[in-house]
Image (spheres, rainbow, N blue to C red):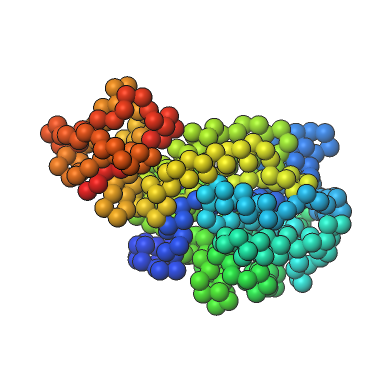
Amino acid sequence: MDNAIRAGRSQREGVQQDPRLDWWRDAKFGMFIHWGLYAIPAGIWKGAEIPGIGEWIMYRAQIPVREYEQLAKEFNPVQFDAAQWVSLAKRAGQKYMVITAKHHDGFCLFDSKVTDYDVVDATPFGRDILKELAAECQRQGMRLGFYYSQTQDWHHPDGDGNSWDYDESQKDFAGYVENYVKPQVRELLSHYGPVCLIWFDTPKGMTAPQSRSLVELVHELQPECLVCGRVGNDMGDYASAGDNQIPAAAVALDWETPATINDTWGYKSYDHNWKSVPDLVHKLVDIVSKGGNYLLNVGPTAEGVIPLPSVERLLAMGAWLEANGEAVYGTRPGPVQGLAWCRTTQKDGCIYLHVFEWPADGALRVPGLAGRVSAAYLLTDLARLLQVGAAADDLLVQGPAVAPDPTDTVVVLRV
Ligand code: H79
């Protein structure tokens, strides 16, 4: 098993059997949304650029709870429009959305009865973000899941991680899980309609019984709701690769890579290190060719706007998927693995050859497929058959001299 993957026992024992994951196995591409109070400082605290990922600013700058929580009084994202966000995910070709209900800073984007540190009770905005998103996802036919930080909570006196305000040795972590985490998970699964998954994170410190009881609570309230492997202790419905980690080879598990478009999850005003569209398409296809899902993050601003560079990239990925989605959605890893210039996926009697680096003369040579292919054509030009031959074990396909799609040309091989 790949080191990058945190696998649940259920995944190791019954590989890709559970029908509750059928939709998720076919979905391949989701939108992650990291949004919270950290979008206000956006990476800068008292004039200093704080290094690292933006949603960690409270930790990295050791901001006292009493100071950080004042940000709630400024949280007024008047440009937030759930319909626009869901529509963007749809146009990007994403099949599910996962938003931070509560990140490590402890601030909640939903109306929670067990704390006032939430968007409804503590901010001038006063609207339940998750309620609006859930309604809009229903309307537009998008699945919605919630990120929930079950271990770290830098605001709660008994949560993990904040040693600058609280004495770690005095913490009642078990009480925090019982009396705070579980009631909140119950709220998330009771008040927002069908929830497609709960994305727990950083399980360090969770005991096996604690992880198990969270999994059971989720399944008791919504049996169809999936649990991310980061619930800890080898549990959960699917495995999670490390942040931005792509395994080197195909993995015979249900697994997902969460990833950033630039170098932060929560919005940072000065992170302009945006990945290119070809890079993002390649990462998606690379992951899918290895059997995984790509959960690609956006970090909206404090005004409620998804940054334009993210929007542009997502729309470009959506345009590519509009033409080539057949070779992505519902596929499984293809038979040819480990080549630099291409990836393969497959379904329904087709192998999809994703060519990242088109050969100069258009002569494609695919190891191991000689004699297996009855016809070859470009996915975007179904009418024109390409010439097929063999050399020893290699399949030869003569394509056009110039790459039809410089990012990824998909050649369909009928088998
Ligand atoms: O939600 C996103 C991250 O905030 C979360 N997972 C993704 C999906 C995450 N939690 N922990 N980590 C990622 C690992 C974080 C490590 C670091 Fe650091 C935080 C490196 C720099 C800041 C540890 C703490 C080392 C320095 C401070």
**Corner quadrant of residue 355:** top left
- For residue 1, say whether it is visible: no
Measuring from the top left, give residue 406's x and y in whole percent.
Answer: 43, 29
Measuring from the top left, give residue 14's x and y in whole percent.
Answer: 35, 66
* Residue found at x 38% / y 47%: 327
Q: Nearer the viewer, residue 63 or 268?
A: 268
The residue positioned farthest toward the bottom in the image shown: 220
Q: Nearer the viewer, residue 98 or 11?
A: 98
Instruction: Classify 173 as above or below 346.
Output: below
Measuring from the top left, give residue 164's x and y in whole percent.
Answer: 76, 50
Instruction: Classify 113 as above or below 55.
Output: below
Q: Nearer the viewer, residue 140 or 100?
A: 140
The residue positioned farthest toward the top in the image shown: 360
* Residue found at x 39% / y 62%: 11
- For residue 304, say whether it is visible: yes
* Residue 95 left/right relative to 351: right
The residue positioned farthest toward the front in the image shown: 383
**Corner quadrant of residue 17:** bottom left
The residue positioned farthest toward the left in the image shown: 392
- Numbered-mark total: 0
* Residue found at x 42% / y 52%: 329
Instruction: Classify 65 as above or below 378.
Output: below
Instruction: Classify 36 as above or below 191.
Output: above
Q: Nearer the viewer, residue 143 or 335?
A: 143
Measuring from the top left, give residue 175's x and y in whole percent.
Answer: 68, 71
* Residue 385 left/right relative to 220: left
* Residue found at x 59% / y 46%: 297
* Residue 27 left/right relative to 351: right
